[in-house]
Image (cartoon, rainbow, N blue to C red):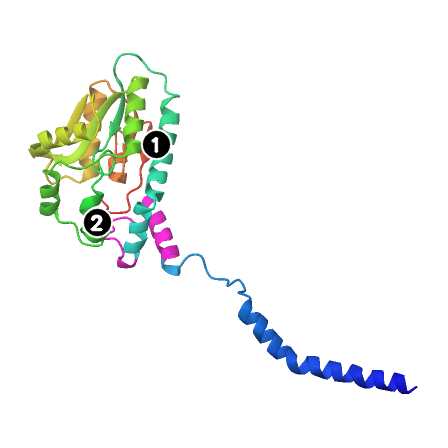
Amino acid sequence: MACSHNNTIWFFILVLFTVLISPVISSRVSSLMKLPVIVESRSSVDSYCDSWRLAVETNNAVKWKVVPSNCVSYLETYYSKGQFDKDYSLVASYALAFAKTVKMGGDGKDAWVFDVDETLLSNLEYYKTHIYGAEPFNSKEFSEWVVQGTTPGYDASLKLYEDLKKLGFTIILLTGRDEAQRSVTEKNLKDAGYSGWDQLLLRGQEDQGKAATEYKSEQRSRMVKKGFKLHGNTGDQWSDLQGFAVADRSFKVPNPLYYIA
């Protein structure tokens, strides 16, 4: 009986001891074990900029002037970490897949139209010095950049360009650059790896002051009147693709740096 009584006493002592020291043990264990911390993987700013870029690329954010200042860092990452290249490559793959379905006439009139700036040639280095498009566009400064003729091409556009030539498409380049920039543009394109285009169309004196959509639509209309079948058109601006005399399929490549009406 005494033994049973002693056992009961020791049991209550053990329980009391456990209760008293458990906070200490818990504190020590917590200090030794690093528990996983749940944090949001993306900031609200990045989330907003994702949505903003979608609105830009789908032409819902029409007539926007500059990149939002809180999206500058986001765009720097978008370009430097490779997502832009992946996006462009995917669009190019869709364009090539369509091109392979075209029944070619074999008369040299099956045409594919390309824009130049931000479609074949990248002006990213220029825009890096202008806060990734967060500064208002300065046409004088950009013209000074163009005449340097050092703009690189895109891997994805060069591959698409070459694949289309192999398929037999006639390549027509339609740019908003001025006729006075023809020589430097031709040299820059060749230095970047492009060759064998049929025509390079630039703004003449009569085209000055026209909106891009009007100017490019008129140029495409002239191509159609000359008998060209415009199967495809690739550009970074909706004004490269819309209007009248449009191609059978148009492919918008990414450009969240600026907007041209």
| Number of the front mark, 1 or 2 | 2
The location of residue 90, given as percent across then percent down, is 38, 35
N-term mark: 1 or 2: 1
Element at badge 1?
Answer: helix
Give the magenta range: 46-70
Q: Is residue 148 magenta?
A: no
Label 1 CA crowd tier, 10 Å (few <14, some 14–19, many 20+): many
Q: Where 28 falls versus 244 (above or below)?
A: below
Residue that numbered label 2 is attached to: 128
**The residue under label 1 is which amino acid type?**
Ala
Residue that numbered label 1 is attached to: 92
Nearer-the-camera pick, 202 or 34: 34
**The residue under label 2 is which amino acid type?**
Lys
Tell me the residue at 27%/38% (across/down): 236
Task: Indicate the quadrant containing the N terminus: top left, top right, bottom left or bottom right.
Answer: bottom right
Is 9 on the left-hand or right-hand side of 107? right
Residue 58 visible in the snapshot: no
Label 2 CA crowd tier, 10 Å (few <14, some 14–19, many 20+): some
The location of residue 60, given as percent across then percent down, is 33, 48
Q: Where 105 falls versus 153 (above or below)?
A: above
Nearer-the-camera pick, 102 or 30: 30
Q: Quadrant of residue 19?
A: bottom right
The location of residue 34, given as percent across then percent down, is 53, 65
Q: Where 236 falls versus 246 (above or below)?
A: below
Q: Quadrant of residue 25?
A: bottom right
